Each structure stands twice: as C-alpha cells, then as structure tokens.
Amino acid sequence: MDRENLQLILKIYTDNFDFFVEHENYKWLAIQHFQSRWEPDAPDFGEMFWEATAATDNLIDSRYAFPRSGIVELAKHEPDTVRQLFAHLYADDGGDLIDRQDRVNDFVADAAVLLERYVPGSWKMKQDLRTVLTYLNLRHPDDNFLYKSSPAHAFAKIVDFGNSFGSGKSFKLANYYQMCNELLAHLQNMPSLLDLNLSRLGEATWSDSQLHLLASDIIYCVGSYTELFRPAFFTSFDPKTKAAREHQAILDQHGQNLEAIQAELDEVREAKADLAAAYDLVGVVLRHRSWGAGTVLEEDGDKLRVRFAVGDKRLLLSHLVKNGLVDVIADVPVVKQADADTLSEGTIDPNRPSGAAVRPEDDKAKAAAELKEYFITLVGLLKEEDRLVKELTVANAERRMAE
C-alpha cells in the first residue's frame, strides 16, 4: 500500500472533516438506530425490520432499487424463513471470512428464490452483495466494513493496494477486509483525526470504538467526493498562484458535475442490468409492428433471435421497446421449464423452444401484465440513459474547453 498517498488521503479527510460529517454522519446514526431496534424474535418481523432500518437512507435503498421493501414483502409470506435468513447471516463465524462470504452468498441466493416465488420479476427488490454486506454492518459494525464497488476500487487504485478483491461474483471479502484493516492500522498514527472523530459522537450515534465505520467512510469519501481529492491525485496543475487556484476551482466544478452525471448514469445502468436479469424472454411471444407474432428463441443480453412467419430475425430489445415496435401477446406468455413443473395445469408445447411452457390459463393475464410493466420500465430506463449520456457528452466537452 502506498503510504505517502494514504497519508495524503487522511490529511485531506482531516482538513475537510466538518464537510464529511455534514454529509455522511447519517451512517453513525443509522447503525445506532438499528442497534436499538433490532429484535429478531419480534412477532411481526417485517415491521420490526422496516423500523430498524428506517434511518439507513441510501445505504440500502436507492432511487431505482428498494431492497428494504423486498424483505418486508417476503416477511408477509414466510416470516420464519426470512427470520432464519438473518439468523444464518448473523451467526458467529469466529472471524472466518470465507465462511462469512458464503453466508452472504447464501442470503443473496435464498432471497432471490423467495422473491421469484412471491414477487416474480421484482428486480427492484433484489438483495445484492452490497445490500447484504450492509445488513452485516448494521448488526456487527465492529467486525465488518461497508462496501460500495466504485469508491472501494477508486481507493484501492490510489493507494496501490495489490491484492485485488474483484467485484460481483468474483468479489473476495477477505481481500477487501485486508485493505480496510491496513487503513485501520494507519489510522492509529493519526491522533488529530481520531480526536476530531470523537466530536461526531453522541447519544444518537454509534460509538465505533473499533473505527471500522470511520475506515469505511474514508474509503467511500475518496471515491465519491473526487472534487476534494482530485487536485492531489488526478492533476499536475500548479495551484499556487491565484489564477491557477481560480482555474482549478472551475475545473473542480466541472469535475463535480461530471461525477454527479456519471454516478446517476451508473445507477441507471445497474438498474437496467437488474431488470434484464429478472426476466427470461425465451419462449415469450411478441407482436412486431411489421412482422406480426413471433416467438423469442434466444436471448443474449440486449440481442434477441425471434421466429416470425417470415423467418428468424435478430433484433435489439432496446431498439424494439424504445421505438414501440413490439408488444406482448397477452394470451400466450410462457415460463421456464423448471417453473412449469410447479404449475399443476402447465403443459409443454412441442412447437415452443426448449425450456418454455404454456402457463395455466389463470396465470396468463398476470404474466402478460408483468412483461408489459417490464417493457414500460425498460423504456423509461433507456430514455433516462440516453438523456444522461447526452449530458455527459456535453459536460465532458465543457470540461475540455475549460482546460
């Protein structure tokens, strides 16, 4: 780890401590709020969970995803199963981070099964890696660290942390915690920052005696408030003269604007990916404006192969839905073969692609409505993505002109 860069990061964080407290202290409040309200044996688990996580702000939910609502919804159907999900996640592992990551992965997988069972297509309620790690932090903050992919990788790059912790399915919890613990060790040599940190604490805040939350916050701030860290790590412009400082302030403003647009764009794209993962279009029958009814034979990301009467066509789903070229035929939606086995009235149609089955009659309208909602949501996300890409292009051009 680059000690010089790490020292500079801690100096910038110390110099801007009041700013970070103003914008990020809700994390200390959220953990204390959770600690004082978590009652795993509460009669109404969903209501208890909702109240315990009420102060988490964007630690769990975002503008596009609502995992908290997912837990509450599942608790309505299988409260004891959901209770057990958290009991398994929170079990003592004696510091075994491999076991801990396995339990995180178990939670993600088991919650996905429950959501598909009770709220099919509910990608907005998905329980992902970051969300479940946040649940761990809320319950055991002295043994865990908060994680958000982009800031964590930005920090790792600046301090030249050599032990990659990956992301998504390749994420390695032990390696990420190693980076956090190295930062934690360095914090012990920053008495001025530790003294300042005491000033943020009160009756309503988590005491953070092990400084895990402070370490998590520093990592997050480096990757999220780049306008404060950019002069130190991302530019060689000499800031000593007044003109240079004024010029740097303009560049910082442009940079802040770029970061905000990019963050929103990343959020939209993540929501779009989650949405796509929630629906399997193979076997679905679409009505094309020009070619009529066609069955989806293959789906590869945004690419579809659809069989129409005129022959097979390779099409882009985003182009189809954004331009209103297709609609779902309400009387023939299908489900995967694996799901068909659980439907007492499901029958396999030999004319459909492998893995597709006709839904029972009473499920058809519901399935069609879900797919229509999928298309409507996808159109909204695609339009939002287009808008943000244009804004980002303009903002980049303005930044280059300012340079």
Image: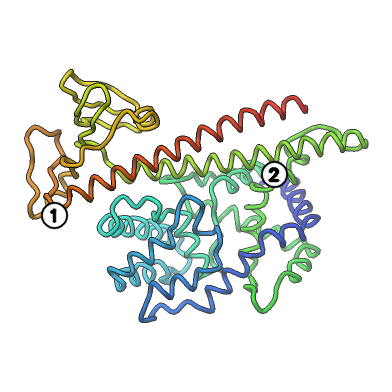
Residue 125: x %, y % from top left:
39, 56
Depth check: give the residue in front, 199 or 293. Answer: 293
Depth check: give the residue in front, 173 or 302. Answer: 302
Amino acid type shown at disc 2: Thr
Residue 238: x %, y % from top left:
86, 33
Amino acid type shown at disc 1: Thr
Q: Secondary structure at mark 1?
A: loop
The residue that label 2 is drawn on is 226
The residue that label 1 is drawn on is 342
Q: Secondary structure at mark 2?
A: helix
Outermost residue, top side:
310
Outermost residue, right side:
241
Query: Is residue 237 shown left or right of residue 240?
Result: left
Residue 27: x %, y % from top left:
61, 64
**Discs 1, 2 touching: Cβ within 8 Å:** no
Dot 2, crowdedness within 10 Å: few (<14), some or many (≥20)? some
Number of numbered tags placed on the structure image: 2
Q: Determine the residue positioned at 65% across, 66% down.
A: 211
Q: Is residue 58 above or below residue 254?
A: below
Query: Is residue 279 shown left or right of residue 7?
Result: left
Q: Is residue 281 above or below residue 74?
A: above
Q: Quadrant of residue 30?
A: bottom right
Residue 107: x %, y % from top left:
36, 60
Q: Earlier in the sequence, mark 1 or mark 2?
A: 2
Query: Is residue 41 shown left or right of residue 219?
Result: left
Q: Is residue 268 above or below residue 343?
A: above
Give the distance between the C-alpha atoms of the residues marked 1 and 2, in whole angstroms.
Answer: 51 Å
Give the quadrant of the C terminus.
top right
Query: Is residue 352 shown left or right of residue 108?
Result: left
